[in-house]
Amino acid sequence: MQFEGKTITVDTTIYDAFKVRAEAGVSLVVVDEELKLLGTLSDGDLRKAILTKNNLSDNISKIFNSNPIFVNENEYSKSFAKDKLIKNKIDMVPVIDKSKRLINIVYLKDYLSDPTKEKIKIPLIVMAGGKGTRLAPFTDILPKPLIPVNGKTVIERIIGGFTEYGIEEISLVVNFKSEILKAYFSELEPSYKINFINEKEPLGTIGGVNLVDLKKHKTFFLTNCDILINIDYSDLYHHHNDSNNDLTLVASTKQFTNPYGVCDLDKNGNLKNIIEKPSSESLVNTGLYVINSSILSLIPSDKPYNATDLIEKLLEEEKRVGIYPIDETQWSDVGQWDEFRKTIEKI
């Protein structure tokens, strides 16, 4: 199909639309069976739908833009389309014929001579002190951050994703087998500088953050050392600031399949049907956050404390905790063998 992966229909679920949008990397055109233009669906439309508690299994009929910017065939030129894109601050514009049938899609990225990533100058903290017991026997010998993912360690892949956005101040909070990790980076001689922060005792998934000097910084990224996330980190940063959040949690769509046949009962308790291996969609915590330094006083010193503990405390104190939804194809959890194998096949 000419526009395969670039168009969707109204009956597409929000969950599936998120996946198509993540693969395309740009807004989608909503069409009918005859390719007639019905509207557009942007990343922002999908995030708004999730943040306003729409069910991921609902279709997109109520969330797409049914009054889109478009270009008529008889007025189309590259310069005209470019002006439409820039003037309306959109990433793509559909071109239609007189019957409103889609004949072309013009993308802003095709007009950018230097599509470099926006640079954001905030620190990155990687929590790299865990034992990684789920990855035994590998972690019986080496620390979890050094697990190889297609020729490169997972920690190098994580840091590399951030340095593309200008992140220069990088701290690794370490504990288990930390000397091996330090020795690896001393031999590697990377282009970036790493500040190793040593936990005397394991401090949980966020307790060690208080050991990092963040006095000069209002905001920072925090990530686990066993996740790979392929997103625009500058967009995440701006989402956090624009939402006035104290903490923003990156949450991924995730489909779960029940391995059993589920009994569907009527109101009298009689069996109506058996639903074989039903699936459901949820949002799950990926382990990546944007955090304001002002809330670090809530983290106790010198005792184990997890990110989930902090989030519960923030909610109790009515601080702003937001989410940044992503599609599960943009997230890989290499901290367990099943997901690690899937990641190897995907990358």
Image (tube, rainbow, N blue to C red):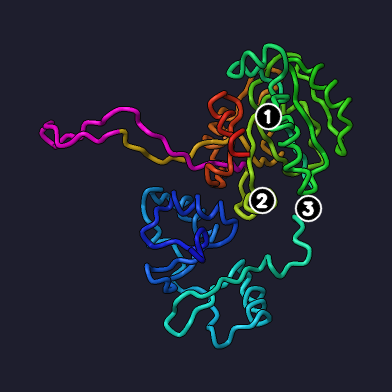
Side of 318 where 83 appears, left or right: right
Please tell me whether mark 1 sits on a helix, a strand or a loop.
Answer: loop
- Find residue 166 and report its horizontal and vertical position in percent: 80, 48
Label 1 and label 3: CA atoms lie apart by 22 Å
Q: Position of residue 147 (x, y in %)?
A: 69, 24
Hey, what amino acid is under mark 1? Cys
Q: Amino acid at mark 2?
A: Asp
Q: Quadrant of residue 34?
A: bottom left
Badge 1 vs badge 3, beta-carbon distance below 8 Å: no
Residue drawn at 62 percent across, 52 percent down: 239
The residue lying at 60 percent from left, 56 percent from top is 25
Question: Is 59 on the left-hand or right-hand side of 263?
Answer: right
Q: Between residues 283 and 34, which one lies in front from this camera angle?
A: 34
Q: Which mark is residue 119?
A: 3
Q: Which residue is mark 1?
A: 225
Question: Is residue 70 a member of the stretch shown in magenta?
Answer: no
Q: Which residues are magenta?
A: 247-276
- At mark 3, the secondary structure is loop
Q: Which residue is mark 2?
A: 232
283 over 76 or under it: above or below: above
The front one of 215 and 191 is 191
